[in-house]
Image (cartoon, rainbow, N blue to C red):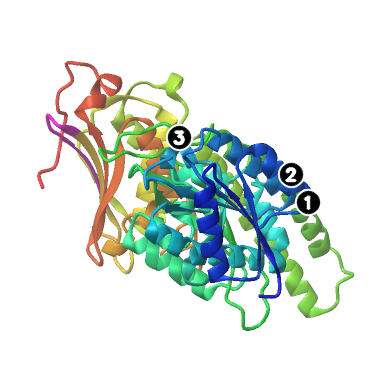
Amino acid sequence: MNYKYRILIFDEDPHDRGLLALALRNAEPALELLEASSALEIAQHVSRGPLDALIVDETDASFHEIARLAAELRRQTPLVVLWLFTASAELPSAQACMGLGVDGRTAKSSAGFLGLPRALLDRIVGMRTLRERHQTEVEAVFADSFGLPACLVGEGGILRLANPGLEALLGMPRYALLDLPLERLMSSLEEKAAWRDRFERSRTTVSGAVSLQTQEGRDISLAMTGRAVAVAQGEPPLWAVCFLEVGVPRDATGAGTAPTSPDPEGLLYAISHDLQAPLNSLASHARTLQGGKSIKDAEAREAVDEIGALADRMQRMLDGILQVATAGGGGDEREMTAMDEVLEDALNNLHSEIEQAGATLERQPLPSLRINRGQLTQVLQNLIANAIKFRGDRIPRVYVYAQDTPEALRLVVEDNGIGIEARDVERIFGMFQRLHTEREYPGLGVGLALCRRIIRAHGGELSVDSRPGRGSKFIMTFPASVWPLLRPANATSEGGKAE
């Protein structure tokens, strides 16, 4: 060890301080070990040079004062390791440690005195390596510069660093997140496999929708973006990853819960708005170059055309984000509406597509509901359009009907298309999630995310029952608990299809 690490032990008990210092020296003689029994002594040591680690006895009444001091230390040295040497494995609670950036904790026992030195030194060395090789990314993630939950992910998907925003989002202190595989936080096996494949194959950036599970067991829908950090040849990969909450979390019963971050829809809108100006400028320059005659080189002209195509695609993606961000509103615009009229609106909008594909549509009478007519028209239009698009070699046939029971009302759009594999039935509802290439089936992968958000905003849930090669049934389920908001108390069944 060439560098002499400075480690400060804060403990009111001089016997415990001395015993821990002895254990640390036995593990690594080349250490500068400091001891303190008050915040003032900590400040005096800090004034003489930066620290690499601060070990805190949580039984001291000034624990939170020391934690705040550690936060101030990190303004000077971002990766100061904060480690708790606890008399109890449960105190302070995980909730009390939230947002404090606690890198580790060890119970004060015989095993603790023996085990803490190696665990602490491994963490210090890892943090210093990150700081030396990737200072910009480390400081950005650690200081929460983006205002978003963020982390650094290393080889094997292991979390190397997590900022306070990610702690707050997941309800987990940092010591519970560090060294944890990122995929272990994901909600489904399909998502784990898909993201593992993306990180292994990509060399630049990855982005898309993901569901992470909080400490309380809630699933949170997020947009996740990862950027590959430049590493020297032969070094393990490293990713800077940030998250943006784009959906309302659902509890175990499927009911909506309050977002863990303030106004995620407003944040989405603001991001889209801020990106619109540079995107307009990029598209304008691309059109200027495409329309000019100064570019003679064929390869350069091809590159300009590709820039224009990418700008158009980015515009459609921004439009999709705005649609999803605003889809949950419209509560004041709901009125009692015949769903048969809503279906007519959707079919009129799709007249050309239906005629061109030779599609047939069967229907049964639908009930009247208190809805936002424009939003439900959009849902039916998207579902029917998908049934026509993903038809394979068959002439598309679409069947729209209702199933009314004492427990729930279900509106169903059934088709005879190509169907969906079981592993993909949840993935298709994510933002920008696509199961096919652009050449096979054009589109952005926004429509179903938008449909689900609209149905959830009306108190229901959108799901799919599908078999590959045998078609799909997209089911809008409204449980009896939301009926007072959707239909008159004396409403009766108006149609249905037996299963």
In this view, the mark in front (3 or 1): 1
Q: Badge 3 is on which residue?
A: 259
- Read off the magenta span: 398-408
Q: Report, in whole angstroms, how far the alpha carbon at label 3 lies from the one at label 1.
A: 44 Å
Label 1, secondary structure: give it.
Answer: loop
- Relative image position of residue 67 (x, y in whole percent): 58, 40
Does the magenta-highlighted stretch encompass residue 470? no
**Residue name at image x 46 percent, y 26 percent:** 330
Q: Report, in whole angstroms, how far the alpha carbon at label 1 lies from the one at label 2.
A: 7 Å
**Residue name at image x 67 percent, y 40 percent:** 273
| Callouts 2 and 3 close, C-beta under 8 Å | no
Q: Badge 1 is on which residue?
A: 48
Q: Give the image quarter of residue 458.
A: top left
- Relative image position of residue 79 (x, y in whole percent): 65, 55
Crowding around mark 2 (Cα neighbors within 10 Å: few <14, some 14 to 19, many 20+) is: few
Q: Report, in whole angstroms, how far the alpha carbon at label 2 lies from the one at label 3.
A: 43 Å
Judge by depth and name the residue closer to the eye, 419 or 12: 12
Q: Residue furthest front?
A: 15
Is the residue 373 above or below the residue 292 in the image? above
Label 3, secondary structure: give it.
Answer: loop
- Relative image position of residue 253 (x, y in whole percent): 25, 38
Q: Badge 2 is on which residue?
A: 44
Q: Earlier in the sequence, mark 2 or mark 3?
A: 2
Label 2, secondary structure: give it.
Answer: helix
Judge by depth and name the residue closer to the eye, 227 or 319: 227
Judge by depth and name the residue closer to the eye, 120 or 372: 120
Quadrant containing the N terminus in the rendered view: bottom right
- Mainly helix, strand or loop, the magenta region? strand
| Callouts 1 and 2 close, C-beta under 8 Å | yes
